[in-house]
């Protein structure tokens, strides 16, 4: 597949490495010029591009940047992908730790729904709760005991099947969170977030989640 990655931080960079290992054609970008990604491109064989060009003719697009930077993306940033190509967003809202207050999210809009609105495309939420080093090193073949499960939120359709298959090929058990309206179940502060559960454990944790944003993950703590 041709995959465009917008964001080359810990998750975006790790996915660049893993997806190139699987033989995919990867265009990777950050918020700066392509030459700032020369080392990553040389290491992996990925092609460093401007962010506005990352999605061009892509079969899949991954957006992996700080939540506060999403509004700074160019208008129509993923519009040049192939028709029907799914968009994954790996982001988390860290109001106290990094992002400051995003009023719409604090008022109740789901993090992924907010990202979708900002970029003008439906999204699948995945890779947001796994430590980058485990994403890099702990993938296992399908059927392996204690295989780490990754929750995936998003709508039904061929894009969903592609995302589930990709997670499996990366070495993790895809677990269905439900549509984006249920994506709060895997946001920061929920039982599944940051845990390396197997599929059964991930399903239990998703079921135990509560929709209320906890004080640690809100800008409005007073």
Image: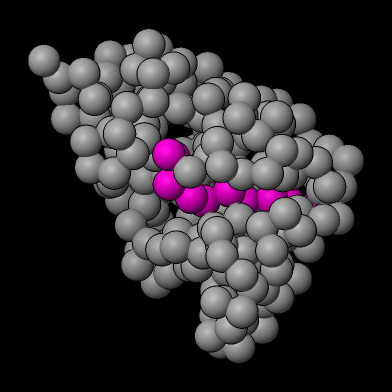
Residue beneath the point at 24% across and 29% down: 217
Q: Quadrant of the N terminus?
A: bottom right
Q: Is residue 209 above or below residue 191?
A: above
Magenta residues, start to end: 58-68
Residue beneath the point at 21% across and 36% down: 96
Q: Residue furthest top?
A: 107
Q: Is residue 64 above or below residue 91?
A: below
Residue beneath the point at 68% across and 44% down: 74
Residue 174 colored magenta? no
- Using the rendered image of the protein, determine whether residue 184 is visible from the camera's viewpoint: no
Q: Position of residue 129 (x, y in %)?
A: 37, 45
Q: Where is residue 180 in the image (x, y as percent from the top left)?
A: 55, 23
Q: In which quarter of the image is the C terminus?
A: top left
Q: Residue 108 lies in what quarter of the image?
A: top left
Count of numbered circles on the image? 0
Q: Is residue 47 above or below residue 175?
A: below
């Amino acid at each position: 597949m041709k995959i465009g990655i917008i964001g080359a931080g810990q998750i975006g960079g790790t996915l660049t490495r893993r997806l190139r290992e699987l033989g995919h054609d990867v265009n990777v970008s950050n918020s700066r010029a392509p030459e700032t990604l020369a080392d990553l491109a040389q290491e992996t064989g990925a092609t460093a591009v401007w962010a506005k060009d990352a999605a061009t003719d892509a079969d899949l697009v991954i957006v992996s940047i700080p939540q506060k930077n999403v509004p700074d993306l160019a208008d129509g940033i993923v519009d040049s992908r192939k028709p029907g190509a799914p968009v994954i967003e790996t982001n988390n809202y860290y109001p106290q730790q990094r992002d400051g207050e995003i009023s719409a999210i604090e008022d109740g809009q789901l993090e992924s729904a907010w990202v979708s609105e900002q970029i003008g495309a439906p999204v699948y939420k995945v890779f947001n709760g796994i430590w980058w080093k485990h994403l890099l090193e702990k993938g296992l073949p399908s059927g392996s005991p204690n295989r780490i499960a990754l929750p995936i939120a998003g709508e039904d359709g061929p894009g969903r099947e592609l995302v589930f298959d990709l997670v499996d090929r990366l070495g993790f058990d895809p677990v269905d969170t439900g549509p984006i309206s249920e994506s709060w179940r895997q946001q920061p502060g929920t039982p599944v977030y940051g845990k390396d559960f197997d599929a059964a454990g991930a399903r239990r944790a998703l079921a135990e989640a509560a929709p209320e944003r906890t004080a640690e993950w809100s800008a409005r703590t007073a």
